[in-house]
Amino acid sequence: MAKTVYIAGLGLIGASMALGIKRDHPDYEILGYNRSQASRDIALKEGMIDRATDDFASFAPLADIIVLSLPIKQTIAFIKELANLDLKEGVIISDAGSTKSAIVDTAEQYLAGKSVRFVGAHPMAGSHKTGAASADVNLFENAYYIFTPSSLTSPDTLEEMKDLLSGLHARFIEIDAKEHDRVTSQISHFPHILASSLMEQTAVYAQEHEMARRFAAGGFRDMTRIAESEPGMWTSILLSNRETILERIEDFKERLDEVGRAISKGDEEQIWNFFNQAREQRQAMKIHKRGGVDSSYDLYVDVPDEEDVILRILELLRGTSLVNIHINEENREDIHGILQISFKNAQDLERAEHLITENTDYTVVIK
Amino acid sequence: MAKTVYIAGLGLIGASMALGIKRDHPDYEILGYNRSQASRDIALKEGMIDRATDDFASFAPLADIIVLSLPIKQTIAFIKELANLDLKEGVIISDAGSTKSAIVDTAEQYLAGKSVRFVGAHPMAGSHKTGAASADVNLFENAYYIFTPSSLTSPDTLEEMKDLLSGLHARFIEIDAKEHDRVTSQISHFPHILASSLMEQTAVYAQEHEMARRFAAGGFRDMTRIAESEPGMWTSILLSNRETILERIEDFKERLDEVGRAISKGDEEQIWNFFNQAREQRQAMKIHKRGGVDSSYDLYVDVPDEEDVILRILELLRGTSLVNIHINEENREDIHGILQISFKNAQDLERAEHLITENTDYTVVIK
């Protein structure tokens, strides 16, 4: 049976979601809310949505499923607004916020007792591009699409959502909202604080020690890359996950104290163990480049520093999809570096290894 | 006049230095010390050095210039040993250690009053490769070669060193030893502690929150990359730059406290300013990929996700030297991503911009 889906927020995520829903459900009617007209016009013109509004409440009663694809604060405000509207019996409400507890708690508080279903969600995908104009039906491919079920989530809620979103080709996964926020505080929220703090500390230090600007190299560059993230989004994330992040900060300060004590004492063994353990832990941890790609298939080629050497290798690999290509830095005080090529799957990786080994003298390593 | 140069330590740095000295001074005699036989044999066989020994003291009296290219601890031990040897009148002694104060202080203490000249040095170059077998005459090209003059450094000392090392094609720069250690503590030593601490914190957290392993993505990967560095080297660095690093740790803890207080209070404006300031500071800071390359010339191309698109661009750029090529990650919660190509100089950059703009529809940005 054709459903009516209401997507509030036609940014990159919302508009890409509309495209993904259309792919598997061309008969569904998709309604769209967006405050600014530009994205509404594009979404209509490109056929991503069937009807558009700038009055959120007006379309809500028409929908079988409502997806809020908005900043955290606005998501919370709209959930409260939905509690006062006359919605369809059994409507499903979901969202796309980066933190989950604050949103799920609001839903539990305001929607309980009503004939609505709710499931929090966090699609771990994105791009540097923004807005409906950048919508991409493949944006969520192989990305984690995290659901955080709560008391308003009946078993059929998840089934209906997965069916609705089947065209996204994402990896659906379920996790408790609080646990989601704990995990992301450790691997994402707190690291952003570290990166920005290191950047600020260095900027202040460089005022009196100007060579700091000059000598900063690869390691520092990597450590501060995410300090360039959009401030508004990260402010909302910190404010909606306060206790967990504060707890990570306190824990980290104790770790710094421990390293500091080892340095004060000149405890060589303890410092060596600290560095060695971290090294082993990182080597053991398979870290994905993109939240959501379950594994990447990397090949390392030890290439000479010659003109057109990359071109020569890419010519050999013509027709193979590359996920990424990168020449690693050479720096004694940092890590490694040779030509690294990442593929989407094991077959492409094997094919590339074969082609390069057969046609060049370069050493090829797969790890 | 042909000189006799004694290089102690035939690892990557020492052996590459030998090659660089030979390039501009083919008539100099180069003596080499190395504890293990393998690197001695390679260095002799490849003609990097003229004579080799495993007895450091034996060749020291023959040298006009002695370069210690060894771990920090051994550098300090050998300076003490040199103080007791009957060296040539006016011999120059230098080194290649990553921290400078401890080494320079030792030289000042043990070599003062003797007829020797000393200048501490830190060549900011390296590779993931090690040993004499990986020696590369171009290893130091455009890299900073930092000298830390002290009371044992007469003006002619630096002139003679720069003449000796002219074939390295490095960028010579002078800085006070203590200032060197302050600057590198901020942009290198302390960031290594941060990276390893974050890795350990996450590994411990992941024992109880296993999704942390699963959801870790690009930002976390970047923040922990240097946690894979060689533990022994970093232990020596920390131990030889204790006070400065401890001071950076304390300062950083105060910064974490300040962010923590803003989070506790829910001070949206302060948190936004924190992130925004760090973002602006990083955008303003030109960070080099490699310690030593004074500037990189980067071009960004907004490419579609199509097969062979990189190949097509590299074909346009055939014959242009690339320093690096990288597809930036796409992740909403991190930073950007488009094809980034780095060139050696402004001419290559302009040529590339022209070629890509003329021959494709892709947007090209230079920052």
Image (tube, coloured by chain):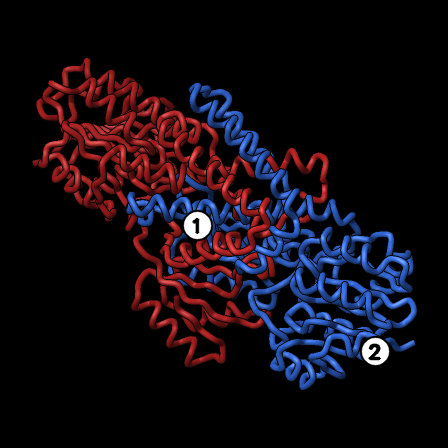
Chain colours: A blue, B red
Please, is residue B53 above or below residue B285 in the view? above
Q: Residue at x 41, y 59 (%)?
A: B283
Query: Which residue occupies the foreground of this view, A186 or B259?
Result: B259
Can you name the residue that lies furthest to the top here?
A: B84
Q: Is residue A339 visible?
A: no
Residue A243: x, y in percent?
65, 43
Please, is residue B80 above or below residue A283 in the view? above
Residue A237: x, y in percent?
62, 54
Q: Chain of mark 2?
A: A
Query: Which residue occupies the foreground of this view, B123 or B197?
Result: B197
Tags 1 and 2 on a common chain: yes
Q: Chain of mark 1?
A: A
- Residue placed under numbered mark 1 in the picture: A221
Q: Residues within 10 Å of mark 2 (few under 14, many from 20)?
A: some
Q: Residue at x 47, y 23 (%)?
A: A261
What mark, if any, has residue A28 been given in the picture?
2
What mark, if any, has residue A79 been given in the picture?
none
Q: Secondary structure at mark 1?
A: helix
Q: Residues within 10 Å of mark 1 (few under 14, many from 20)?
A: many
Quadrant holding the N terminus of chain A = bottom right
Quadrant holding the C terminus of chain A = top right
Residue B129: x, y in percent?
43, 40
Q: Residue at x 73, y 66 (%)?
A: A78
Q: Amino acid at mark 1?
A: Arg
